[in-house]
Every structure is written in structure tokens, then in C-alpha cells.
Amino acid sequence: MWQLKTELENAVEALKGEIWSLNGQLKASILDREQLQDRVVQLDSSLAAEKKRADALDCELSEQTELTEKASRQAAEAENESNRRLAECLEMETRREQVEKAYAQLSEYYSQLQAAYNVIYAKMAELEKERTQNQQQQTATTSGGDSGSNVRDVIDTMISELHLEATEDMDLHARVLLIQKTLREKLAELEEHRQAIAEHRRANEELHEQLQCLEEETHKAGGENRDAKARLLQLEGDLEWKQDECDSLRRRVDELQTTIDQLVERNHESDIRERKIKERDITGSLQKRGL
């Protein structure tokens, strides 16, 4: 009995040693598992931070996209406005050419009328002088009548060319006044055309300045649009890279989780096997001692 008791005590001590060893291994496995869990938590935190950063990049990408679209719309509006102003400039240029052409025709017509007017007044002054000097002489009177007839012919020709209406009872002075009135009206019309040309020129200059400003703004908007597109492409690249990095971190977390599960399962199976072996050995030893 004493020997059996001693063997049982030795077996119990050996079993306790095995249990302590298994407990140590279990604690080490638990510690490894906790470390792996801490690593998983760190990776989850990193994944959350990267996801947050990816969301921020996505927001910035959306903002840059909106800015790019806005810049594109502004550039299109500026281009449309520039085309409209250019059409207005062309229309104003055409009108200016028409007014200048009419002004040139009026100037030529005015020069002709002025020359004829000067000739008429010169002849009238000459006739008046001849009448004063030769008032008592029949020949001078006849000559003056002939000269007066010549002047009347010139005036009638001018009235006809000017398309004026003159009655038969109008004397020479009335006819000259009619021509003078017509000339003054033509001069007033000429001055109006001159002012219209000046106004068109000022409007043309303003339109050209506005067109130049629009072209500069269009060029500037085009530069901003190019910068925004470059920034957009960069953000898209960064976002894609961050997405790949997040996917890689997720795969690593899944692999670590699988490794932890396998390690725990192996430790559990090893504990069960060792416990069964120890129980079988103790049972066999007790059976032998009993026999």
C-alpha cells in the first residue's frame, strides 16, 4: 500500500507538473492572443484613420470637381459673352463704315455746293458792282441783264440738281435764299452724321476694351480650369492609392484573425489530447496496481 501510495503521489505530482506546464502554455497562448488582438485593434484604428482620410480626400475631390465644373461654366459663359461682344463689334464696325461712307458723300456734296455757292455770290457781287457803275448806260444795263440771265441760269441749274421746288414768281434773291437754306440743312445733317460717327467710334472703343477684358478673363478662367483639372487628377490618384492601402490593411487584419483562430483551436485540441493521454496513463497505472 505504501508503494502504491507513493506511486500515486508521484503520478499526481507528475500530473500537476504537466498541468502547470499546460497552464503556462495556455497563458503564453492567451498572451499571444491578446498581443494579436492588440495588433488587430491597432490595424483597425489605422484602417479607420485611413478611411477617414480617404473620406476627406473624397470630399476634397468632390469640391474640386464642383470648382472645375464651375470654372468650365464660367469659361463657357465668358466665351459666349466674348462672341456676343465680338458680333456687336462687327455690327458697330459695319455701321461705322456705312456712316463714314455717307459722311464722305455728304462732304463731297457739301464741297460742290459750297463751291457753287461761292461762285454765285461772287457773280452777284460783280453784278451789283456793274449795276452801280453802269446804271446810266444802256449797254452796261444790257450787259448786266445778260450777266443776270447767266446767274439765273446757274441758280436754276443748282435748284434742279438739288431737287428743290422753285416757283416762277420767285426772284433771284429768293432762289439764292432757298439754296442757302438747303445748304444750311445739309450742313446740319452733316454735323449730325459727324457726331454719330464720333459716338460710334467711342462705342467701338468701349466694346473693344470690354472684348479684351473678356478675352483676358477667359484666358484666366482657362488657366484656373487647367489647374483644377490637374488637382482633380492628383486627388483621384491619391484616393485610389488610399483605397488600395485600406484594402491591403483589411486583408492583413483578416489574415491575423484567421491565424489567431487557428492558434486558439490548435491549443485547445492540444490541451484535450494531453489531458486524455494523462488520464489514460493514470487509469492504466491504477488498473495495473489494482491487479
Image (cartoon, rainbow, N blue to C red):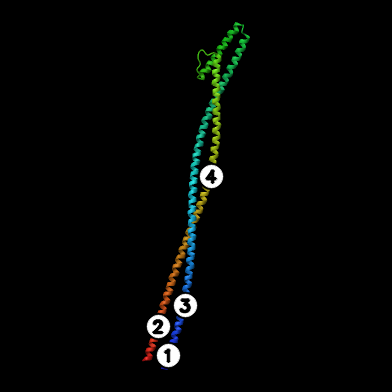
Contact check, label 1 and label 2, Cβ < 8 Å:
no
Q: Which picture quadrant has residue 136?
A: top right
Q: Is residue 149 above or below residue 88?
A: above
Q: Where does label 4 land, which residue? A: 217
Task: Please indicate, yes or no, whether residue 154 appears anywhere in the rendered image.
Answer: no
Contact check, label 2 and label 3, Cβ < 8 Å:
no
- What's the distance in space between the residues labelled 3 and 4, CA to CA? 73 Å
Q: Secondary structure at mark 3?
A: helix
Q: Where does label 1 land, which residue? A: 7
Left or right of 168, for residue 278: left
Amino acid found under the numbered disc labelled 3: Lys
Contact check, label 2 and label 4, Cβ < 8 Å:
no
Bin the neighbour count of mark 4 within 10 Å (Cα to Cα): few under 14, some 14-19, many 20 and up.
Answer: some
Task: Please indicate, yes or no, whether residue 192 appears anywhere in the rendered image.
Answer: yes
Q: Quadrant of the C terminus?
A: bottom left
Q: Secondary structure at mark 2?
A: helix
- What's the distance in space between the residues labelled 1 and 4, CA to CA? 102 Å
